Image (tube, coloured by chain):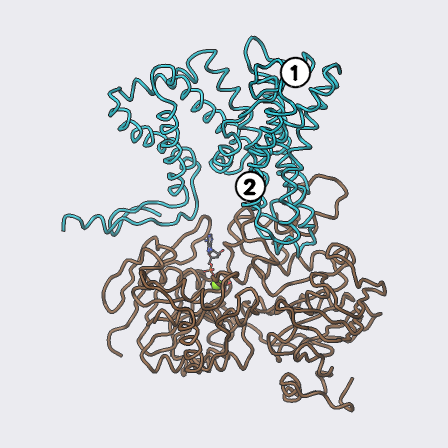
Chain colours: A cyan, B brown
Amino acid sequence: MRCEWMAKIHFEKRNTTAKWVLFLVPILSIVVGLCFAGIFIVTTGKNPLDVYLLMFEGAFGSAYGLSETVVKAIPLMLTGLGVSLAFRMQLWNIGAEGQLYMGAMGATWLALRFPEWPAYLLLPGMLLLGFLLGGIWGLIPAIPRAFLKVNETITTLLLNYVAILWVDYLVYGPWKDPNGFNFPITAPFSENAILPVLGPSRIHVGLLIAFVATILLFVILRYTKWGFEIRVSGESAVAAQYAGMNYVRNILLVMFISGGLAGIAGMTEVSGITQRLQHGISPGYGYTAIIIAWLARLNPWAIVVVSFVFGGLLVGGYSIQTSGFSAATVAMLQGAILFFVVGGEIFIEHRLRLGGKGGKP
Amino acid sequence: MGTPLVVMRDITKSFPGVRANDQANLVIHKGEIHALLGENGAGKSTLMSILTGLYRPDSGEIRINDQAVELHSPKAAVERGIGMVHQHFKLVKTFTVAENIILGLQTSGEYYHLPLIHNQIREFCQEYGFRIDPAAKVWQLSIGEQQRAEIIKVLFWGAEILILDEPTAVLTPQEATELYKMLRLMADRGKAIIVISHKLNEVLENTDRITVLRGGKSIGTVITKHTTEQELTTMMVGRSVLLDVPVKEQYHGDNILTLKQVSCLGNRGQLAIKQVSLEIAGGEILGIAGVAGNGQSELAELIAGIRSLEGGEKYIDGTNHTDSSVRTLIKAGVSYVPEDRLGTGLVPGLNAVDNFLLKSYQQSSSWFINWRQAVESTQAMIAKFDVKMASLLNPVKMLSGGNLQKLLLAREISADPRLIIAVYPMRGLDVGAMETVRKLLLAQRAAGKGILLISEELDELFALSDRIAVLHEGEVMGIVDPQAATIEAVGMMMAGKRMLKQDAV
Ligand SMILES: Nc1ncnc2c1ncn2[C@@H]1O[C@H](COP(=O)(O)OP(=O)(O)OP(=O)(O)O)[C@@H](O)[C@H]1O
Ligand SMILES: [Mg+2]
């Protein structure tokens, strides 16, 4: 009899989801995630609250922390926007990581090949090449998808490894800096190939590029005929064909732009942060982007916000590493928070009902 | 009659902006076939969704076998022996019929042996006089066949209370008769059957009792033997309705559509249309009669450009459009009301404004969409065609079945087309709405448009068409004048008998 209430818990699909639910659920999920991860922190003999405070301070508590958070948010925003565009059309592009690497490669090639070009030529050129190479990397799996219905989830994923290994080959081999003490890095970029920073911080012009991309994407999806086609195609491919929309062309175009945005992230990373191409330029931005796009429900503005939160999570993690936590513990912490945030999503679509009666729908 | 099997008392259910059920009552007995009647949007589907645990009522009580029950989920309803075949099917299209049935089975922990299930399905079909291939993929099936799969699926669960939401809307008259025979068999074995329908004659012929809903309220329950069509319509609409078809005047213009020996493939790669030649003149309604699955949908898709031709030529207003894209054909003035409204003709997750724009957004030369104008046009169209919806901005999947159909027709007619391809346009409409659609089609005809009307209702075809072509296995068996031909003659051709030369028009 004691356990009867257990049998009376039900998940029920919500008819409509109130706005406040959309905000409250992720926040509560983060709290639960922190509590859960706290148990593990206690076992290491530390006070979880102290640790979290440290993390928060590290990410948002100082001008330096804040600027680092923004720096991390830039590639997350760009890849998140790219991924979200593909998701709109139900194209499961999980290849943003590889597209980012390809963009970085393209930008680097130009920077190393024409270091003497003036910045106003070189930087836009690098941006364009980053976009182009990332786009091509998105386009390659789109072609079999569009014409032969080959599942893009797997092909985009596999191309990540190709791109990462290709970059590795270049930085370990032909592009390796002869003065680099045998590190897997290219020669440093010339002055002209480096993105200017905003004020006295590491925040570079990539932030503005990301904002422009956000606004463009929002306007395209909301106000243009092409954006309308993408929305329709994502909801129902048959209806898109019925209405005479060019479904195949849209698949190719969307995957190209999706990859291109990730490619731009690669360009801003090499040009703004590392200022050369090197092994492991991304700590998995392209994968985190998938979660960001999803949590933001593919809304461009929400992607901006969520990217900052995730940037903070990264920077906060680094900052407690300096106070005696192993990188593995930090990764686990981040994982636990993610797990609960993603798991909490069920409450957005569903409500919990206790007991037989009661509770308004 | 003993204790009722199901009692729904004072059920109220509101959606944002509408009260779909308003203190509705329904009593169902074992062994009866019970019809649920009402205008489009009266709340029939909602009431049944409550009984199947899909929605929870705001207030009211459900009793099964005199026991108050809480139906939290479809699973809870299935456990109580309640099964429903929905207006819009809930099958996984890439799975086979058998796989869909296994998906629906609620017993867990068992390993299913597919060949065994195939056999069971075949036996089942035989017992109730069905025909279906258990190994066929659902997307390859016609809508009629998909419905059979749905029915089998629910029966397989061993439902004691079987609910069918407008089941005959997608069936041929013969299939409908078979269905009711089967339902009677089940009722005789003690099951309770609830059927939602807009077809009064079918309800009067085949059911035991009838409950009428109007504006979410239950108006009353009558015994079928003791009621009339007039009484039912008065109960449904709240006033009496004329059931006549308006008189039509002859007018013939130049040919709008010409098909010369066209052929095309069906979903399964077979030849679905074989060397068909047809012509439609301006101001003419050409009816296509035939048993479902004899090439009707393929013919419609071929004309609309969705299916490419294997051979032959297609002309619209004298211009060769044999290889034209869908977009070109839309520009040339081809409107198409497809069989599958929700998913093809309308995008379920988008709102009425988006759906209104689905084709017309292409007309402007600008890159941008003028949303304000779109909202205004949508409002005007909805008012003109009397589509009822709570809000323009709700996804259209929330509309009632009849209003969906009205919205689709409204959009296709508003495009001011040259040719209208209407596939089962009356399906799911209430008496009043059917009247409206008939008038709409006749008005389009009077305006000199060409209309291809595909239907399974011979009465409807005879009343509206200027000529009727009969399709059998993708071939035209003959073209008749409805003034001169008999329904029997057309029925023979539908069964595959070619028309004699001297009857031709
Ligand atoms: N999920 C929903 N959200 C919002 N409104 C809804 C929803 N489902 C139904 N409605 C509204 O409730 C009313 C009743 O709809 P319902 O589908 O029950 O009608 P119906 O009697 O089945 O009509 P039809 O004969 O056209 O199928 C309609 O006005 C409809 O728009
Ligand atoms: Mg309905």
B173 in relation to B267, above or below: below
- Say which amino acid is labelled 1: Phe
Given residues A101 and B79, the one toward you in this image is A101
In terms of image quadrants, where is residue B452? bottom right
Instruction: Name the residue rendered at 56%, 16% in the picture.
Output: A203
The numbered dot on residue B251 is: none
Looking at the image, residue A114 sits to the left or right of residue A241; the answer is: right
How many residues crowd around disc 2 within 10 Å: few (fewer than 14), some, or many (20 or more)?
A: some
Picture mark count: 2
How many residues crowd around disc 1 within 10 Å: few (fewer than 14), some, or many (20 or more)?
A: some
- Could you give the CA–CA distance between mark 2 and mark 1, rounded to whole angstroms? 30 Å
Task: Give the image location of residue B497, x and y in percent.
Answer: 67, 88
Q: Chain of mark 2?
A: A
Task: Decide which of tag 2 and tag 1 comes sooner along the chain.
Answer: 2
Q: Chain of mark 1?
A: A
Task: Give the image location of residue B65, x and y in percent.
Answer: 25, 69
Quarter of the rendering occupied by the C terminus of chain B: bottom right
Task: Give the image location of residue B253, x and y in percent.
Answer: 83, 70
Q: Secondary structure at mark 2?
A: helix
B475 in relation to B338, above or below: below
Instruction: Name the residue rendered at 46%, 77% in the picture.
Output: B203
Looking at the image, residue B353 sits to the left or right of residue B181; the answer is: right
Q: Which residue is mark 2?
A: A158
Please check whether the numbered discs 2 and 1 fall on a single chain. yes
Q: Secondary structure at mark 1?
A: loop
The numbered dot on residue A189 is: 1
